[in-house]
Amino acid sequence: MSATKRPRLSVIGTGYLGATHAVCMTELGFDVIGMDVDIDKIAKLGSGEVPFFEPGLAELLRKNLDTGRLTFTTSFADVADFADVHFVCVGTPQKKGEYAADLSYVDAAFAGLAPHLRRRALVVGKSTVPAGTAARLADLLTSRAPSPEVELAWNPEFLREGFAVEDTLRPDRLVFGVRSGWAEQQLRAAFAPVIDAGTPVLITDFATAELVKVAANSFLATKISFINAMAEVCEAAHADVTMLAEALGYDDRIGRKFLNAGLGFGGGCLPKDIRAFIARAGELGVDQALTFLKNVDEINTRRRQRVVDLALELVDGSLAGRKVCVLGAAFKPNSDDIRDSPALDVAENVQRCGADVVVYDPAATDNARRAYPGLVYAGSAQEAAREADLVLLLTEWAEFREIDPSALRQVVARPRIVDGRNCLDPTVWRAAGWTYRALGRP
Ligand SMILES: NC(=O)c1ccc[n+]([C@@H]2O[C@H](COP(=O)([O-])OP(=O)(O)OC[C@H]3O[C@@H](n4cnc5c(N)ncnc54)[C@H](O)[C@@H]3O)[C@@H](O)[C@H]2O)c1
């Protein structure tokens, strides 16, 4: 157990990452204040409602609100008064029309917090940022915080949406980018229960801590695009990418994870993180080192067009006036996150080809409706599929894997399906009378 006194924590930015972090740190025994500029979000969290879908988080939020150790505010002054260690978890989306990350939210959070820091405190960046950002923000803190004893650390976050609670309570590693022993001690104290449970801790400089996150996401994106590139070859060679992946996966130097060929990655992290990494490498004069990530991005985007092409093939070349059922809107199952969702991208493109598209998703319908009001939404898979000329399965929710092909056949106009995630058994669906197509397999 660490000798340093247990610090009081703040979490600035209570979105997917920050809300989970605030709740889980309270669960681990800390006193925590969550802060956001979004008044509605803070009101919801304070009343026990999670403003997004994350399995297990709502129960944990209510349980920890009841302890009185978790509070929420919209005030930087409250945060600075309360906490010794401040976790900054605001968004770093892609800049409009550019590859680079938009750091305006991070800059605003630091600029909002710094003038209130009147006593010794550690500010910890958790947002995913380009290498060099932490060094710049450390200078900002020094120049704007009234206390001379304010320090910065960088602690990248690796949680996966859909498993965010488990990943926060039991992460596979902790990376602390620090410039002093005191900063390291504070972080060790802030993660004492996690460290005591045996989680490895890596102490690095700022730039390495920043790079670990984007390097990890680049590796995962590359692995997905690798198998999707193999899917393209399999399609041309009449081979089966699902068997190829299984056979590759038995080699433990390769591993089976992230080798599911299909519609590719999306979401609020992988696409924008690899693009921001390419942009930053260019600024650092090493753009050649990351040219392969452009290929990774292109392979990923091509899969979306391939699904539209398969859809066209199945309806004899014209989608005009066809009724198309889209199963899935979230960028992945067990999430309501629709940021850069491959499913919605395909749905919109199919609609542009003249189809009448009806979308169903178990959790992301409200978000999808707000972002894509031109699409029609149904309350169930059966309702979305009614009288459909074609079904597109685009997010691999367990609910879709378990659909009974014979029952679904009863409601569609024509039994034709594109399995955009290779998550159905083609033999079973074909035996039930469906024309089944998928990516990278016959
Ligand atoms: N979502 C994930 O799975 C995940 C995983 C690892 C890392 N990250 C990184 O974490 C960061 C946050 O991602 P997210 O998915 O939680 O984003 P998000 O958009 O869900 O949440 C960001 C929150 O920050 C708030 N915010 C914006 N400006 C603010 C300010 N000035 N002061 C206080 N709050 C402010 C927003 O209102 C929003 O609630 C990003 O850098 C992302 O790349 C996300």
Image (cartoon, rainbow, N blue to C red):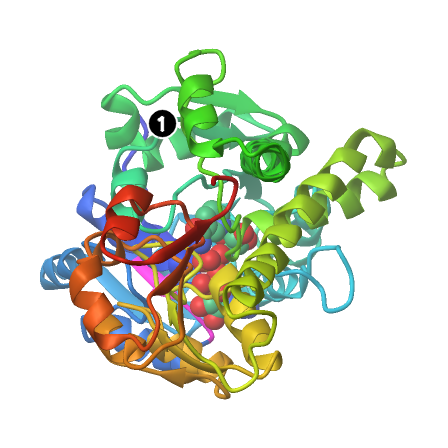
The residue under the point 42% across, 18% down is 247
- Image location of residue 160, percent across then percent down: 38, 45
Q: Residue 121: in sight, yes or no? A: no
In the image, is residue 41 part of the stretch drawn in magenta? no
Q: Is residue 310 above or below residue 390?
A: above
Q: Is residue 206 left or right of residue 426?
A: right
Q: Is mark 1 within 8 Å of ligand 1?
A: no
At a point 24% along the width and 31% down the height, the residue shown is: 193
Question: Residue 205, relative to residue 303: is it above or below?
Answer: above
Depth check: 272 or 244 in front?
Answer: 244
Horizontal and vertical percent position of residue 255: 43, 20
- For the residue pair 365 and 77, the one nearer the viewer reads as 365
Foreground pick, 46 / 170: 170
Q: Which residues are magenta?
A: 33-37
Task: Say left or right for 388 vs 236.
Answer: left
Q: Quadrant of the image for the N terminus?
A: top left
Q: Is residue 398 left or right of residue 396?
A: left
Residue 71 sits in which quadrant?
bottom left
Relative vertical location of residue 277 with respect to residue 374 in this rendering, above or below: above
